[in-house]
Amino acid sequence: MKLNRLLENNDMGCVFTGPGDPAEIEITSIETDNRRCIAGSLFVCIKGYVTDGHRYAAAAVASGAAAVLAQSREALAEYGFDWEHSKAAVIFCPDTRWALSGVSATFYGDPSQKLRLVGVTGTKGKTSTTYMLRAIYQAAGLETGLVGTICNKIGEEEIPSERTTPEANILQELLFRMLERKIGTCIMEVSSQGLHLERVGHCHFETAVFTNLSKDHIGENEHANMEEYAEAKSKLFTMCENALINRDSAYAGKMLEKAERSGAKIYTFGIDSECDFHAKNIITKQNRVEYDVAVGRREYRIVVPVPGRFSVYNSLAAFATSYLEGISPEQAAAGLRKVFVPGKAENVPTGRDFSVLIDYAHNPDSFINILTTVKEYAKRTVFLFGCGGDRNRPRELMGETAGKYADFTIITSDNPRSEDPESIVRDIEKGIIPTGADYICIVDRRSAIEYALKNARPGDVIVLAGKGHETEQILKDRTVPFDEREIVREILNTMK
């Protein structure tokens, strides 16, 4: 595609400075990583939290980039890039993140305008809701795309995911590839960072879903406070035709206000409030939840093989979304009966008189969700968790929450990254000590799991929290394989 075509969208404020004629410059790819640049690439300089893409403009040109899109002359000059004598064309714009989404959408033919894009946002429940919705589409015989935390999918093709919501150039390419495969719907997790950093800029959503909002992602390099966090989430409801909002959330009003201002059709779901899709007659069991949902004059019994009240909200959101997207309630109910969400209250068979669950819970609210669910049927709840390094997590509060809700807590490592694992454990311990709870600290996570299994009592439910679907552990100097399912099986095999 010629460069002038990419710059036609005047909402980006791009200014071409040369050299050359943009109508003659052929662009072959759009990149934000200079190492991926090839002959003809457009390199977009993105200033990140860790490094600044303007630093790599010269390297991108050396790799063959035909054009560089930068935020300012000063930003390039700071890293010694002589834009006035560049052999590659140079374009300036006020916001390269917004421009990245714009040029990427144009380059790939605005794919979000041609398929039905469903976005799910919220602190918790994004992954579960998207997987549940995908299961419904499968029950209806419809192939979908999936973008999210665990992986990205184009039909049954699985593509590794680096973050919940990909950078705009990667996202638009995924959507384009879905269209190539004749896939009509993409189900996407939309993170607050994905909204704040314009990763979903220039996207059109058919339906946008709000699950909930709780204190997470607050701190340096994320959101300054809850108000800013809520504002970022609410942006999705200015980009959709249908807005589906959890009426029970304290932040529902914020989302409803944004949706109303943008002219979206508004629908609500919940348990405790009057809403369009209301769950009632809820029964929670060890391996599932059941409830009734009314649609018009008919009621449908929903059975979901994921335990917990939170599973009611997630499945209800998926049911309501599928209804708005034209799928029958019968097909939705059939899909939800078969759903499997990796790392979400995932049972690991033990063949013993105790149970093991793997769950992605990694903040105080999700701790409460999984622990209150398990307490309904466990004789004793054993809770194993750590906190990720280089992340703004309320470690003391997480320790306090575990102490209040678990019968026995094992504090260990998660992904320590560049931090000292023992220091992280000590931070958590400060929160659990005042609760007077029974606990132990075992820094090495495999050793901690082994301790939990070898000291299990009949009727115990051991919850391995934090890693969920992940199969690696990130240490200071390396990343190592760490699939908790395999580790549990290996340890159990030694306990003959």
Image: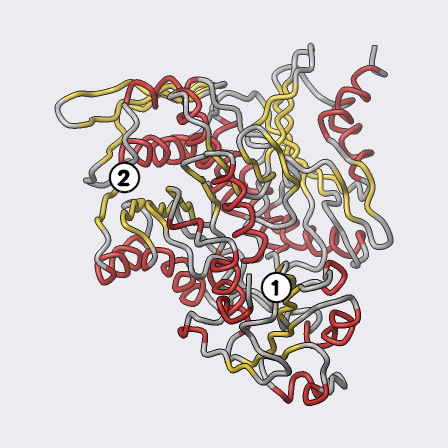
Residue farthest toward the front in the current orientation of the protein? 24
State the residue at coordinates (51%, 69%). Answer: 99
- Front residue of 45 and 487: 45
Q: Residues within 10 Å of mark 2 (few under 14, many from 20)?
A: many
- Left or right of residue 125, residue 67 in this image: right
Place of residue 101 in the rendered image (x, y in percent of width and height, measured from the top left):
50, 62
> On the rendered image, what quadrant is the C terminus found in?
top right
Amino acid at dot 1: Ile
Position of 468 relative to 1 (above/below): above
- Left or right of residue 32, residue 454 in this image: right
State the residue at coordinates (32%, 24%). Answer: 282
According to the image, label 1 marks what residue?
A: 27
Amino acid at dot 2: Phe
- Front residue of 142 and 192: 142
- Left or right of residue 242, residue 216 in this image: right
Q: How is the image coloured?
A: secondary structure
The secondary structure type at the circle numbered 2 is: strand
> On the rendered image, what quadrant is the N terminus found in?
bottom right
According to the image, label 2 marks what residue?
A: 269
Find out whether the residues at labels 2 and 1 contact each other: C-beta distance under 8 Å.
Answer: no
Place of residue 90 in the rendered image (x, y in percent of width and height, measured from the top left):
62, 80
The image quarter containing residue 354 is top right
Q: Residues within 10 Å of mark 1 (few under 14, many from 20)?
A: many
The secondary structure type at the circle numbered 1 is: loop
State the residue at coordinates (70%, 60%). Answer: 390
Q: Distance of mark 2 from mark 1, alpha carbons?
A: 45 Å
